[in-house]
């Protein structure tokens, strides 16, 4: 099929390659900023004298910020296209690692974390929309590899963060991380794919689906993303407080999780092409359950980090499979099922970890990490629904 289009669009393919590189860098930046935040959380809690319950509230504020600005970003993408929105949200996001580092009290900390979560979520929506536009221009799926770049950014941010905080302190770390992210954004800036606005999408009234399938897939995405949020928000604190890890080592929990997640996401489409959505989801879920139990029962921080790495192998392709299935529900317009599943999934990652903070106040993190596999067992019970993901041409996202 490619033979017919090879002669004319040689110049076009160069443009597409640049736009694909740019959108990959956007995912890398977003993941890097999230990863840089993970090892800062114990220091942030210490500086503002927050209990686990209060830190849970702060993480809830982060989630509320995301869920507030995400739909606004969606509306702006319909009006202006994703390129402008991703540029604006990325620029707005960059100063907030520094803002969170210098926040002198709970009020400024809460405002900073609300806006940090907000611009993080808004950029997330815009870069995913840009990835879809690049996919259409390339006529092939790139979503899995884009999410792999997000995980790679998380790995670099978390691993580098723990080391820089230990060596140079939190302020230098925040400054250097911000500088690095700014440089990468500068490299991507002119190459970002310019997609046209979609004003018709804004006018279209989207009714919530009355069939149970998208809601069940949403539940699968939700239960898959709660453990991811738990490792991001509480992994460093668990390693630090309950397993006595150093500041540098505590950053490696999320780093190990991100490393295995990135590797598996780069391989995700190939694995699913070979084994199909259902079998891939079942294997992934079993890995995630084993990894979470391994981390929960670990006698030392090093063993817990291995558990988080195993968990990353599992979680990596559970969410993309749920998203692919949602975009492929028979008799339902693509965007509707997907919007239900992404909203439910992201709320799991953004809001649920605050509840974990409340519970950890009473029972500790080890018990929490031991309980999370119950959610993954539910995903296993519904795994047959992953068959819808196989309907996507080219392996899906």
Image (cartoon, grey):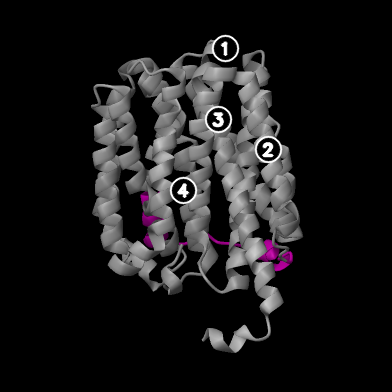
Front position among marks 4 and 2: 2
Residue closest to the eye, 249 or 167: 167
Q: Quadrant of residue 47?
A: top right
Dot 1 or dot 3: first in sequence order is 3
Residue 195 at x, y = what percent? Answer: 71, 65
Residue highlighted by disc 3: 37
Dot 4 or dot 1: first in sequence order is 1
Say whether marks 4 and 2 touch (CB < 8 Å): no
Dot 2 or dot 1: first in sequence order is 1
Q: Residues within 10 Å of mark 2 (few under 14, many from 20)?
A: many
Residue highlighted by disc 1: 47
CA gap, disc 4 and disc 2: 23 Å
CA gap, disc 4 and disc 3: 23 Å
Residue highlighted by disc 4: 344
Front position among marks 4 and 1: 1
Residue 19 at x, y = what percent? Answer: 66, 62
Residue 143 at x, y = what percent? Answer: 51, 60
The magenta stretch spans residue 170: no
The magenta stretch spans residue 220: yes
CA gap, disc 4 and disc 1: 33 Å
Q: Which residues are magenta?
A: 196-222
Residue 93 disc label: 2
CA gap, disc 2 and disc 1: 22 Å
Dot 4 or dot 2: first in sequence order is 2
Secondary structure state at the residue bearing disc 4: helix
CA gap, disc 3 and disc 2: 12 Å
């Amino acid at each position: 099929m490619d033979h017919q289009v090879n002669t004319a669009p040689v110049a076009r393919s160069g443009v597409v390659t640049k736009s694909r590189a740019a959108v990959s860098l956007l995912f890398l930046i977003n993941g890097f900023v999230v990863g840089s935040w993970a090892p800062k959380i114990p220091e942030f809690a210490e500086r503002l004298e927050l209990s686990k319950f209060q830190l849970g509230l702060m993480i809830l504020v982060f989630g509320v910020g995301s869920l507030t600005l995400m739909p606004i970003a969606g509306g702006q993408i319909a009006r202006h296209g994703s390129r402008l929105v991703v540029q604006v949200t990325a620029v707005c996001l960059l100063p907030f690692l520094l803002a969170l580092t210098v926040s002198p009290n709970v009020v400024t900390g809460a405002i900073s974390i609300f806006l940090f979560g907000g611009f993080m979520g808004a950029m997330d929506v815009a870069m995913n929309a840009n990835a879809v536009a690049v996919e259409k221009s390339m006529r092939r799926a790139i979503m899995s590899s884009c999410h792999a770049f997000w995980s790679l950014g998380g790995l670099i941010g978390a691993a580098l963060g723990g080391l820089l905080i230990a060596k140079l302190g939190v302020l230098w770390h925040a400054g250097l991380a911000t500088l690095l992210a700014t440089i990468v954004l500068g490299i991507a800036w002119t190459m970002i794919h310019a997609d046209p606005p979609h004003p018709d999408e804004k006018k279209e009234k989207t009714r919530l689906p009355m069939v149970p399938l998208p809601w069940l897939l949403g539940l699968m995405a939700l239960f898959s993303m709660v453990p991811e949020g738990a490792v991001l928000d509480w992994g460093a604190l668990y390693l630090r407080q309950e397993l006595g890890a150093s500041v540098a080592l505590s950053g490696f929990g999320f780093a190990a999780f991100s490393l295995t997640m990135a590797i598996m996401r780069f391989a995700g489409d190939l694995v699913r092409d070979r084994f199909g959505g259902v079998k891939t989801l079942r294997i992934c879920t079993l890995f995630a359950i084993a990894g979470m139990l391994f981390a929960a029962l670990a006698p030392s921080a090093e063993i817990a980090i291995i558990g988080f790495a195993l968990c990353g192998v599992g979680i990596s392709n559970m969410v993309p499979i749920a998203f692919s299935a949602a975009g492929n529900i028979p008799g339902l317009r693509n965007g509707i099922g997907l919007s239900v599943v992404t909203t439910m999934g992201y709320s799991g990652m953004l809001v649920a970890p605050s509840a974990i903070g409340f519970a950890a106040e009473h029972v500790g993190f080890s018990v929490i990490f031991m309980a999370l596999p119950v959610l993954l067992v539910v995903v296993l019970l519904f795994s047959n629904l992953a068959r819808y993901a196989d309907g996507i041409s080219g392996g899906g996202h």
